[in-house]
Image (cartoon, rainbow, N blue to C red):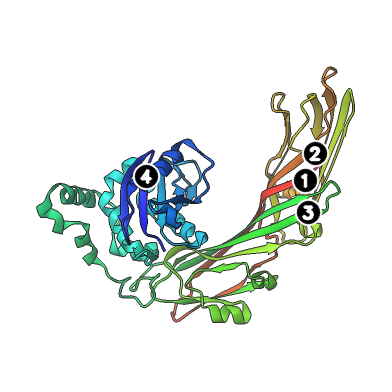
């Protein structure tokens, strides 16, 4: 599958690891140089080899490490200076290789907090040990961070000093950080690779968080051109022993039957396919239990109705935008926490004068962007009114007398977040804990948010 891995910073190769026949750097030198100058290189490409006349090629896959990491430890695309390069001599499924490369980057971030040239140089030994375990003859072997953290402990002050001695003193090579792995083999001895044995907590608890993201395009009349919901169910457990959880879903279970479902390896597939129940021995800590994708068929499935009106004449224009929420009656706690709309007007618009029934309206003279922001309600009465009553923006536009009228299709972008609400109606009916005699504290949080929601004006 993967013949070699390279960690690159700018044009320097920091680490290279070969799993099959070694691949010479000279074959990749031009490609590595182009990564720093050309931003349009696709993540999957092929380059000729020295036997190009015989049709031999190298298949190159690359992922750039982020420079920013969000609070929950996941990657936040910010443009990193380290690139992880995977090279294969065979025609390999691109999605599989790219998924592995992204998983490797996330694993490095879990270990070191970030990934840059300095971190790679300071943790050379640990990174090389991880690369040894991640692949077996080019095939993904161990990618679970729970198991890897037991085999290869994360860096500490002691391990940093030990690694430094291991690199600088040949006689100390047997005293590398591998010696510290003998303290706990509970995970390697466990029959469940994602959960160690012997866990004990004073307070047992389990939390689930269902988040759905809406992507849709509406035409000028409010009809649905495209609509898709991407859902994710996160779990976080602190449970003693080796319990088994049984999670029964509520709402539209057909959402999980359309084939676009991803499950954590801990979920029993046969039980899920039979009745949609999630039965599993959970990992310890945070994990992604379930992901799914659902397609919307009608605008009536949206939690809002949007009615923009824009009239442009030679000397002036008028604009009116009405946003009507449709989340009332779903849940007494359901409310739109924040709402923002933006519309870039034609270049011959030189001024805006207007107001909205609530929120703040701003117009940027340079970018011609009209932005309407509605803050989160501060009282329960405001929240109740906000979830039931339409809000409207009205105003007049001043046009440049010298610039000719510009006819263009404008796009209104919408951003919002709704607490205690999912677009598909999916939820959790109950959670059971089996094989253990305690009753843990259980928590559930659901929310829906806008991804890329736009409407043609």
Q: Give the side of residue 9 with respect to residue 290, left or right.
A: left
* Picture quarter with the N terminus: bottom left
Crowding around mark 1 (Cα neighbors within 10 Å: few <14, some 14 to 19, many 20+) is many
- The answer to the question of whether label 3 and label 1 lie on touching residues, with beta carbons closer than 8 A, is no
Give the crowd class for mark 3: few <14, some 14-19, many >=20 residues within 10 Å: some
| Mark 3–mark 1 distance (CA, rounded to whole Å) | 9 Å
Q: Which mark is residue 62?
A: none
Residue occupying the far front of the picture: 53
Residue that label 2 marks: 409
User: Which structural element holds mark 3?
Assistant: strand
96 lies left or right of 156: right
Q: Is residue 162 left or right of residue 18?
A: left
Residue 126 percent coordinates (x, y): 28, 54
Residue 270 in the image, given as x and y percentages of width and height? 55, 81
Callout in the foreground (3, 1) = 3
The front one of 35 and 363 is 35
Q: Determine crowd level at label 2: few under 14, some 14-19, many 20+ residues with C-alpha closer than 10 A.
A: few
Residue at coordinates 40% horizontally, 70% vertically from top-left?
A: 194
Residue 157 x %, y %:
24, 48
- Is disc 1 placed on a helix, strand or loop? strand
Q: Considering only vertical position in the picture, is 65 above or below 143?
A: above
User: Do we see residue 454 in this rendering?
Assistant: yes
Q: Nearer the viewer, mark 4 or mark 3?
A: 4
Q: First in sequence: mark 3 or mark 1?
A: 3
Residue indicated by mark 3: 225
As drawn, which residue projects farthest toward the left?
Answer: 171
Labelled pair 3, 2 in contact (Cβ < 8 Å):
no
Determine which residue is flagged by label 4. Answer: 8
Which of the 4 quarters of the picture holds residue 186? bottom left
Single out the mark in the foreground, 1 or 2. Answer: 2
Name the N-terminal-most of marks 3 and 2.
3
């Amino acid at each position: 599958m993967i013949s070699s891995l390279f960690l690159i910073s700018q044009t320097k190769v920091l680490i290279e690891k070969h799993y099959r026949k070694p691949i010479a750097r000279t074959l990749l030198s031009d490609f590595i140089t182009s990564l720093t100058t050309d931003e349009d290189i696709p993540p999957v490409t092929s380059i000729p080899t020295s036997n190009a006349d015989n049709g031999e090629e190298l298949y190159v896959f690359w992922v750039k490490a982020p420079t920013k990491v969000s609070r929950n430890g996941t990657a936040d695309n910010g443009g990193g200076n380290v690139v992880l390069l995977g090279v294969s001599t065979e025609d390999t499924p691109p999605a599989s290789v790219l998924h592995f490369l992204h998983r490797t980057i996330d694993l490095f971030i879990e270990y070191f907090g970030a990934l840059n040239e300095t971190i790679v140089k300071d943790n050379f030994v640990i990174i090389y040990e991880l690369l040894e375990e991640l692949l077996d003859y080019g095939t993904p072997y161990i990618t679970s961070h729970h198991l890897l953290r037991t085999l290869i402990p994360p860096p500490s002050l002691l391990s940093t000093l030990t690694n430094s001695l291991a690199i600088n003193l040949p006689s100390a090579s047997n005293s590398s950080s591998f010696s510290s792995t003998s303290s706990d083999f509970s995970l390697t001895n466990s029959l469940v690779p994602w959960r160690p044995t012997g866990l004990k907590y004073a307070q047992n608890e389990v939390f689930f968080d269902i988040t759905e993201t809406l992507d849709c395009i509406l035409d000028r009349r409010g009809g649905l051109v495209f609509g898709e919901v991407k859902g994710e169910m996160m779990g976080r457990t602190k449970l003693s022993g080796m319990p088994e959880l049984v999670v029964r879903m509520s709402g539209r279970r057909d959402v999980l039957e359309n084939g676009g479902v991803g499950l954590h390896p801990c979920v029993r597939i046969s039980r899920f396919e039979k009745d949609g129940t999630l039965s599993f021995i959970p990992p310890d800590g945070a994990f992604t239990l379930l992901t799914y994708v659902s397609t919307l068929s009608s605008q009536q499935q949206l939690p809002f109705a949007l009615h923009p009106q824009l009239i442009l004449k030679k000397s002036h224009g008028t604009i009116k935008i009405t946003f009507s929420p449709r989340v009332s009656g779903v849940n007494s706690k359901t409310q739109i926490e924040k709402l923002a709309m933006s519309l870039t007007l034609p270049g011959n618009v030189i001024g805006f004068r207007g107001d909205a029934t609530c929120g703040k309206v701003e117009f940027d003279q340079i970018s011609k962007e009209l932005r309407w922001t509605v803050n989160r309600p501060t009282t329960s009465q405001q929240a109740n009114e906000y979830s039931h009553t339409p809000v409207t923006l009205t105003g007049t536009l001043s046009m440049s007398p010298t610039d000719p009228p510009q006819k263009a299709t404008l796009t209104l972008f919408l951003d919002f977040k709704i607490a205690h609400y999912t677009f598909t109606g999916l939820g959790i009916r109950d959670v059971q804990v089996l094989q253990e005699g305690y009753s843990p504290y259980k928590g559930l949080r659901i929310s829906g948010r806008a991804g890329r929601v736009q409407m043609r004006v």
